[in-house]
Image (cartoon, coloured by chain):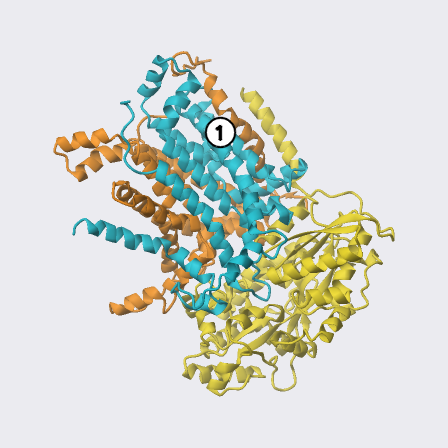
Chain colours: A orange, B cyan, C yellow
Amino acid sequence: MKKMTYSNPVGVGKFTGLLLISPFILGFLLFTLSPFVCSFILGLTDSDGISAPVFNGGENYIRMLTDSGLHKAIGVTFRYTALLVPLKMLVSLAVALLLNMELKAMSFYRTAFYIPSILGANLSVVIMWQYLFTSGGLVDQLLGTVGASHVSWYGEPFHAMMIIVLLRLWEFGSTMVIFLAALRDIPRELYDAAKTDGCGRVRAFFHITLPMLKNVIFINLVLQTISAIQEFNAPYMITGGGPMKETYTLGMLIYDEMFRFNDAGYANAVSWVMFVLIAVVVALLYKLTGRMREGTK
Amino acid sequence: MKKIIPYLLLTMAAVVMIYPVLWLIGASFKSNDEIFSSIWFMPEHIELSVYKNAWETVTPYTMGHYFLNTFTIIIPKTVFAVLSSVLVAYGFARFDFPMKRFFTALLLGSMFMPAIVTILPQYLMWNKLELINTYVPLTLPSLFACEGTFVFILIQFFKGIPKEFDEAAKIDGCGTFGTLFYILVPCIRPAIVSIAVFTFLWTMNDFLTPLIMIHSVEKYPLSLALRLSVDSTGQGYEQRTIIAMSVIGLIPSIAVFSLAQKKFIGGITMGGLTG
Amino acid sequence: MKKLFSFITAFSCAAVLSSCGSKNKSEITKPDGKLDPCTLRFSWWGGDDRHEATLEAIELWESKHPDIKIVPEYGGWDGWTEKVTAQIGSAAEPDILQINYDWLITMSSDGKGFYDIGTLDGLDLSGFDEEVLSFGKVGGIMNAVPVSLSGRGLFYNSDVFSSVGAEYPSTWDELSDLGSVFGDKDLYPIDLDIQSGGTAWYFAVVYIQQKTGREFITMDGQLGFTEDDIRDALVFYKDLEDEHVIRTLKTRTDEDGNAALYQSSEFIDGKIAGVLEWGSAVGKYESVLLQGVLEAGPFLSDGKGNNGGWMIKPSLLYAISKNTDHPDEAAAFMDFLLNNEECAEILGTTRGVPASSYAEESLEKNGKLTGPAQDSNEMLDKLDTVTISPYMELSRMKEFYNTAIEAVSYNTADPSEAAHEMYESIVRYLEKIRK
């Protein structure tokens, strides 16, 4: 058997690391593994969550091949993710840079910009979105003043997706906070040195800030992608999945199958498909950003 | 003049961000028809009694009681989450050990599954252990770094600290834990505080887990108490009391974030290698 | 190392699987005719008014029966089904529960999901019609007792109708005619939706049931409509849109987003002058309009004396857990909730107009039965109504209805195609879940 070499600091055995992550291992065994296994097995059964599950082989998975509703939901989810994630990354980073400056009352602005994240899909937000985007709402009125014609938001498939993307985009707070935390770690001396070298603000951004943020950009990218693919709450509250299921995401389908249609077997099977989809996308992201990021696992 | 422009833009943006909260506060004084027909936040009359009713609730307990419940859950949970996430992230970020790749895959994998899938099996397990209707299912998992997201974030932050720091600590005679506590943790304090804040906020808003795990109204956390009165199948109700309740419920979240970010997030640091 | 891990995995699999299924007590506790001191758990969902009233009723009970304590569990409707499903799936449900009509199918499809109330003497059912009691039976076994009945009726904004100069319609044709009358002023006489309300399909079903005399879904889960009936129902719906009686789905979504009608400024401002709603839930519409504006309208007939096809269902029921240790005491408490005069007065109409004649009399004596909900109820009483099958209320069935209506409204399919698809889906699904 090949001898493993471990690159640990001097004086540290190969089991110290294991000790440190032991809470996670225990927790995984106790709280994560069983539900995952349970879920996998349920995915191979006919189950309604109340009576005992009955094995049905791969019937649930076969059903997925012809379930056009599922295919549509997957398409919707990917469109949504592709729209939201890049925009959110850009906006969070831009605002974080802005709020990192030493202007007065920055802490007030930071709190204000984080508030949408605290609200989430609160009733007030749902109603706000209605005021803005329904016929005769604020956006319509604004369009009217500049002479543009009425735009249908809720009733038009792609537009309905846009207003949901807007909702989540508006909640860029958490992503922004992580960027802010990372920005704080960039030593000021680097910027001062750059200044004396005659480096402009833009160059400083690309040569100092971005490289130092590589890891954080990667985490935010991965985390936002995962939560976008799992999205359920925003379309549920704002459009109910409509019109014509054009904002009906995979997360909503799983929820409906599990809790409204009482088909726990199918819901679990689809969840595993979501699991695999996310794993593939994250692996892709990992590969694509490989050159960009520093270091390996 | 040039100096004012950023402030102007920022203030306009800030108003857009906070408008729903302003609207919520205004709505707590509005009658049902007012709420659904006007976007302007100022109400027609202001009657403070709605807040008194909201505080007292129709249940035998006041919102104060529910706040206490929520804090009983949140404080241990936050402490547990921070402690275990930091330890585990440290292990992954700085150490090499058998099956490291395997465990990293497990960590990532645990984040990919939608939460609703695991909630019922967990319910069955807790039910078997007769710990339903206690706060154990809501707090204990945090002791075991169950939030892959947090561990993952901290790992990346740890990786951002140059290894020279560790070596310098070793030279100064620090052991494994010493390095962690005296050198690494202070460097990533903003990230750790962010994680604590996220735990706080997400737990405050978490509705499904307590709904499934808690039966007695006496033990309801705030998130459940806020939904107590929302019944779309019934004869309807005065929205404003519920809105007043959610306004009251927002206060801790906003306060916590406000305090935390003032001290730990944002602003340019003076660097780490010197001093 | 790896061996240890796989062993632990196998172990937790086994442990989990054994609990993944149902966990039932092997024996049902038989009634012993005595009322022993105990503590009973009682759960319900509702809003503030219902919570307040029920808590007061519980206090009244405990003053009369100090050694039978009731521990209340309650919350809003959101998520309540999930919660009770989880409880039932692990035999941890309360002793007495308020249940929704379709839970009879999802939680007791074989009739044995709840305690057989027929075996309990402590519950006086003389105040109920035999027919009403049958709504709580599954496979002949009495699983639950209906608390109140409710049916959808038409309610109108009297102000708008008088300003337009129109009368409330009493036939389908009269309703169609209103389309152009209201349309001229850019108003709509009523509104239908496909969201959780699902009034669009409901209305179409009533029309066809009246026309053909066939029931859409029978109580034992058979599809009563032919494919042509379904097509005719969809055509009926499309005609309503075309005649400006209701908004098209696109217009509705555009104007209201995802909101219910009582949250829509169109309704509040009077652009939409009527709604099809459950009598037990119409208070929401009353509260956003001014006092006295919302009035109950007649149940539409064909103008030749046929006014059948209108539907009712139990709006909610009480059931007893089959895992309870105290069936007699639970029965006694249920009897109190349903029949006791003082209790009825306290509960009022927070759960609709009581089905128990004792409770209803009590409310009448106290003058609590007024308002459009009551008016609608009285009209409904006089009709030959169809009972909504619990199968019709299942969520997945509602998806079939809504998909068809959407297709027809957005013109992505013609009524025959949509009807064919709905027919196939329903037949297949009903076959699968009928036990």
Amino acid carrying label 1: it is: Ser
Residue at 66% x, 73% y is C214
Identify the image quadrant of the N terminus of chain C. top right
- The answer to whether residue C312 shows anywhere in this view is yes
Q: Residue placed farthest to the left in the image? A: A198
Identify the image quadrant of the C terminus of chain C. bottom right
- Report the residue marked by disc 1: B84
Q: Where residue A256 sits in the image (x, y, percent)?
A: 54, 52
Instruction: Read off the chain for label 1.
Output: B
- From the viewer's perspective, is B9 left or right of C119? left
Q: Where residue A151 sits in the image (x, y, percent)?
A: 33, 66
Q: Residue placed farthest to the right in the image? A: C33
Q: Where residue C433 sits in the image (x, y, percent)?
A: 65, 55
Q: Where residue A229 sits in the image (x, y, percent)?
A: 43, 45
Q: Is residue B275 above or below residue B53?
A: above
Residue at 50% x, 82% y is C159
Q: Is residue C25 above or below residue C252?
A: above
